[in-house]
Amino acid sequence: MRKIAKAIGVAFSMYSKIPMPHFVWASEDMRYHLLFFPWIGAVIGGLEIAWYHLVGYLGVGKILSVALAVFLPLFVTGGFHMDGFMDTKDALSSYQGKEKKLEILKDPHIGAFAVIHLLSYLLLALGFASVIEGTKAVVAVSAAFFLSRCLSGLSVIHFPGAKKEGSLYTEADTSGAKVVSIGLVIQMLLVVTALFIYSGMNGILVTAACLLMFLYYYLMSRRQFGGITGDLAGYFVCMAELWSVIVVGIYLVLK
């Protein structure tokens, strides 16, 4: 139990701003931390569902309620994945070679294209989130926070890395690959099954969006960067979440 508690602490300390007990990390503590990476998504999804129902009781205006719903993931994660999204967009917008793109990912300065894509992302998220109505649709979209992290964890283990350094390389090197992979797949299958049963088409669309984005993430990272990095993993999480909102939003509008 102590090892599990430490693995949970490592996962939440690395990928969220949720306060955790302080302790010295050993390589053994990081071995299974990716197993609990999706649990941060579960926290975010739970907060989104709770906020959706709370809004009805509080009578909060539509714009404010949607703005806070979009802000919640950034608040819980401290913008950890969004930072990777912005760095990746800067690199892709440079149209340079692989090595130059990798240098841009490491550059601490923010570029104009990162700002443009951040604003575009937030506008799309706000727009499509504003048409998400009904508990089944909200649950489906909220599940994307969990599913995206399951897939991101799998990519860290199974996708080729672009470099032999950085936090992602450390995570892949210290993870108990087989146990973590099986655990992530089992968690994902359980959630997807529950989604299909409860949310119907909404759940199918969210699952499809996450899986298609996962395929694109693999192909793009190989072609543009020679493999994945921590920034690219963050980019994937953000894009999977955004496309989940978009496809469900379109479905509800056309329904």
Image (cartoon, rainbow, N blue to C red):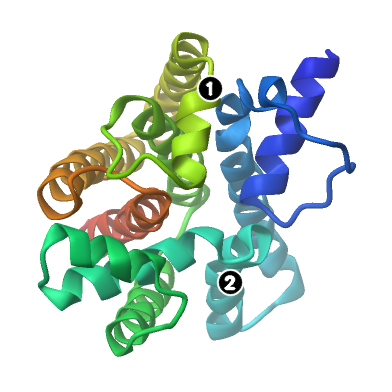
Q: Position of residue 181 (x, y in %)?
A: 43, 17
Disc 2, SS: helix
Location of residue 90 with respect to 240 vertically, above or below: below
Residue 143, can we see it?
A: no
Residue at 17% across / 77% down in the picture?
A: 94
How far apart, in angstroms, are the residues tagged by discs 2 and 1?
Answer: 31 Å
Given residues 98 and 140, the one toward you in this image is 98
Q: Position of residue 195 (x, y in %)?
A: 43, 31
Residue at 66% across / 66% down in the picture?
A: 75
Relative to 169, 159 lies left or right:
left
| Residue receiving disc 1 | 175
Of callouts 2 and 1, the N-terminal one:
2
Relative to 218, 235 lies left or right:
right
**Where's the C terminus, which quadrant?**
bottom left
As drawn, the residue found furthest toward the bottom would be 112
Task: Give the quarter of the image for residue 242.
Answer: bottom left
Residue at 57% across / 24% down in the picture?
A: 35
Q: Position of residue 81 (x, y in %)?
A: 48, 58
Relative to 85, 6 lies left or right:
right
